[in-house]
Amino acid sequence: MSGKGPDLRVNIGPLGLKNPVLTASGTFGYGREFAPLVDLNRLGGVVVKGLSLRPRAGNPPPRIVETPCGMLNAIGLANMGLEAFLKQELPWLQQFDTAVIVNIYGHSIQEYGEMAAGLKGAEGVSAIEVNISCPNVAAGGMTFGTDPDISARVTEQVLEKGDKPVMVKLSPNVTDIRTVARAVERAGAHMLSLINTLTGMAVDIETRRPKLAHISGGLSGPAIRPVALHMVHQVVGAVQIPVVGVGGIMDHRDALEFLIAGARAVQVGTAHFVHPRSALDIVEGLERFCLERGIARVDDLVGTLLCP
């Protein structure tokens, strides 16, 4: 190991990252909101809040509820729309030395293609994350991500119309996530991210009403981490393309579990609601872990799980 400390660089498909820690879409805004608290230059990448072709108001409130070891959200992909992002937020993000991954959503296969086409040639966009797995919107979303054939068609459309590396975000709300993963891989995806949230709900026993106006929402946080870790392990063994682990990662030890299980990078989401510096703390924690154990490259830990 050099005097500079451990090498945290990783590659996920064609995308090179300075470290394996990304922010998860929908939990870090467009980066601007966290910039006063976190040096974005020190992150592996920022996955921006999910974008649609046109602005979306999202679901009516209440749309976030705290639960034991996690939270439910039914935001409904509220966002400023692609055009506003390209004009207002992307130029601002270009000042940082970090990968910018744009999460996209569509109501139809054609709309996913239009989103990819709208990002074609956009400087400063490192990759596209295709959201086929959101559980709290009425059209598209998880409906696409639970059908292997439709998932593949969405992937093909994004690849055909766009010019960026493509990461597809998978839903855990399926019988066998490996089936969808393989279909998306065959369609040409460069990488996968998993998992998105699990579908859940909460009830106010005094009013006897759902705590979310949308009734159900996506469960995230530490409560889903064992599920996410298991699914990542399954998918890593089922595909050849890189996997990014997502789900309940709160500190560097959680991140290490995913890396050891075979994920080449991780995304940090709900932790930001607890501590805005969580992603940066995880980067620093990974560095300390490697330094204390004489591990020269964090990449050397990836896929080192010892199974009986």
Image (tube, rainbow, N blue to C red):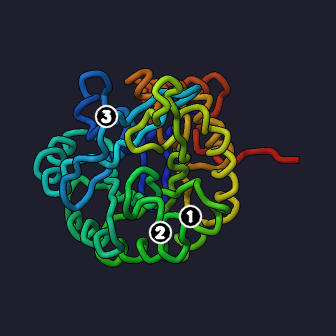
**N-terminal-most mark, 1 or 3:** 3
Residue at 40 percent across and 33 percent down: it is 64
**Residue 41, labelled with which disc?**
3
* Crowd class of label 2 (few under 14; some 14 to 19; many from 20; radius 10 Å): many
132 or 289: nearer the viewer: 132
Mark 2 touching mark 1, by CB under 8 A?
A: yes
Closest to the observer, 253 or 250: 250
**Going 59% across and 45% down the picture, which residue do you hit?**
299
Q: Residue at the right extreme? A: 308
> What residue is shown with label 1?
241
> Are dots 3 and 2 in contact, CB under 8 Å?
no
Give yes or no for contact between labels 1 and 3 (Cβ–Cβ under 8 Å).
no
Q: Quadrant of residue 175?
A: bottom right
Q: Counting other residues with Cα less than 10 Å from the Cα at mark 3, is it few (<14), some (14-19), or many (20 or more)? A: some
Determine the secondary structure under disc 3: helix
Classify residue 102 as left or right of residue 154.
left
Q: Quadrant of residue 294?
A: top right
Which residue occupies the foreground of this view, 275 or 42? 275
User: Which residue, given by chain and number where applicable, does mark 2 sit on?
Assistant: 189
**Callout 3 amino acid:** Asn
Give the mark nearer the N terminus: 3 vs 2.
3
- Spot occupied by residue 5 in the image (x, y as percentages of width and height): 52, 28
